[in-house]
């Protein structure tokens, strides 16, 4: 391990009910914006089904390398999404970064 694919997951709960139109819009917009960043692979917007987890949703994606992961974090579209949407609409979150 140490040089393989990176899996980035952001588990989160929105300030809206999970079944609301606002939540669906957030998920759709997030998928469109974040999956459009060239280094992002295997993007998925997922809904939690287990009562064992306190979060409602997850954005999951892969990066081929640490450099791609850093490029994503610094990409203007990612930074804009974080400042304009994530910071205003997400109630709580946990990020998990794993290497294959």
Image (cartoon, rainbow, N blue to C red):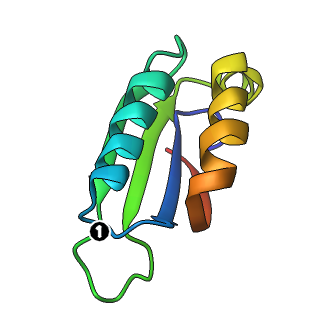
Work out whether residue 11 or residue 19 is closer to the camera in this orientation and state it. 19
Asked if 56 appears above or below 33 in the picture, the reply is: below
Asked if 46 appears above or below 57 in the picture, the reply is: above
Q: Please identify the quadrant where the N terminus is shown.
A: top right
Which element carries disc 1, helix, strand or loop?
Answer: loop
Q: Quadrant of residue 67?
A: top right
Q: Which residue is mark 1?
A: 48
Q: Quadrant of residue 55?
A: bottom left
Q: Residue at x 46, y 15 (%)?
A: 36
Q: Residue at x 39, y 82 (%)?
A: 53
**Is 71 on the left-hand or right-hand side of 10?**
right
Q: Position of residue 9 (x, y in %)?
A: 50, 51
Q: Position of residue 28 (x, y in %)?
A: 33, 36
Q: Residue at x 35, y 54 (%)?
A: 23
Q: Residues within 10 Å of mark 1 (few under 14, many from 20)?
A: some
**Outermost residue to the front:** 21
**Is 36 on the left-hand or right-hand side of 81?**
left
Asked if 98 appears above or below 92 in the picture, the reply is: above
Work out whether residue 22 or residue 31 is closer to the camera in this orientation and state it. 22
**Outermost residue to the top:** 38
- Number of marks in the rendered image: 1
Asked if 3 appears above or below 75 in the picture, the reply is: below
Q: Residue at x 23, y 64 (%)?
A: 19
Q: Position of residue 46 (x, y in %)?
A: 29, 53
Q: Position of residue 8 (x, y in %)?
A: 54, 45
**Is 95 on the left-hand or right-hand side of 36?**
right
């Amino acid at each position: 391990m140490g040089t393989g694919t990176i899996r980035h997951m952001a588990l989160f709960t929105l300030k809206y009910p999970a079944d609301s139109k606002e939540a669906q819009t957030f998920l759709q917009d997030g998928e469109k914006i974040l999956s459009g960043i060239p280094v992002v692979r295997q993007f998925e917007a997922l809904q939690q089904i287990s009562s064992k987890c306190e979060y409602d949703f997850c954005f999951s994606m892969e990066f081929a390398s640490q450099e791609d992961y850093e490029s994503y974090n610094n990409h203007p579209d990612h930074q804009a999404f974080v400042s304009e949407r994530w910071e205003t609409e997400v109630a709580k979150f946990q990020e998990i970064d794993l290497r294959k």
